[in-house]
Amino acid sequence: MSSSPYPSLLDAWTRTSGYVLEGVLAANRATAAAFGVPVGDRATNGKAAVGSNDADDGSADRAVEDRIEPDADLDEWNVDLEVGDRLAVGDSVRFGKTITDDDVTRFASASGDTNPIHLDEDYATDTRFGGRIVHGTLVSGLISAALARLPGDVIYLAQDSEFLKPVRIGDRVTADVEVAEDFGDGRYRLDTRVVDDGDEVVVDGEAVILIDDSA
């Protein structure tokens, strides 16, 4: 067993009130909405709270059309899974997709992050980035998409991320997750990163998860 500080972090996490988990789930729901993934009744509530108050604007119909089945994979996604029946150190999963303008718009609507640097090309052109960039949380959300492919029900306990390079609309990025440490009791530390098509790291960090295979 490593002397890593994560076990104590996990113990502290489990003693905190429910809003901590709710905050993580809210971020994951926003990312899921951007990818067109259904997120249960909360997704319906969020949809009603975002956008126009006009019931006939067609947004409800579009949201239903955009939903996909749980555990489905779309043709434009690349998934590479190297995992046994039970998670072990060294196991890995990669999830890649192109971040589209539609992804960015949906994420802005779902999350409420309407910073013009993500949405307004004229505004963004005059910034240090010289054009629109993708929300950092949307990019790092691909890590969550990768984790969804692991065996069992994955529960995020902690995520530490460093954003190293902006991602542009139309860029293809890949989340690369590898199990680095097994704490026991279904808890693992993971090395997490997101790379672009040139294999440059755009997001780097590590996560702690709980695999709940009791179902």
Image: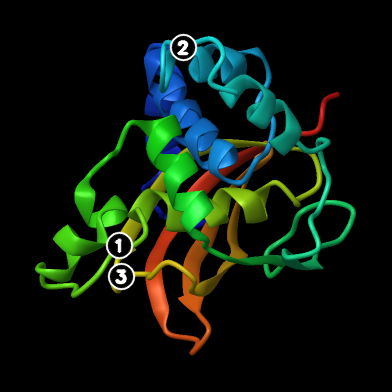
Residue 194 shows up from this direction: yes
Q: Amino acid at mark 3?
A: Pro
- For the residues labelled 1 and 2, the Cα–Cα distance comes to 40 Å
**Badge number at residue 162:** 1
Discs 3/2, front: 2
Callout 1: SS: strand
Identify the residue at the far right of this view.
85
Q: Amino acid at mark 2?
A: Asp
- For the residues labelled 3 and 2, the Cα–Cα distance comes to 35 Å
- For the residues labelled 1 and 3, the Cα–Cα distance comes to 11 Å
64 or 74, nearer to the observer: 64
Q: Say which quarter of the image contains residue 156.
A: top right
Crowd tier of the residue under label 2, counting other residues whose Cα lies within 10 Å: few below 14, some 14–19, many 20 or above: few
Label 3 sits on residue: 166
Q: Residue 6 location, x and y as percent?
A: 42, 45
Label 2 sits on residue: 54
Callout 2: SS: loop
Q: Residue at x 48, y 74 (%)?
A: 171
**Badge number at residue 191:** none
Residue 129 position (above or below residue 18): below
Q: Is residue 13 left or right of residue 178?
A: left
Of labels 1 and 2, earlier in sequence is 2
Of labels 3 and 2, earlier in sequence is 2
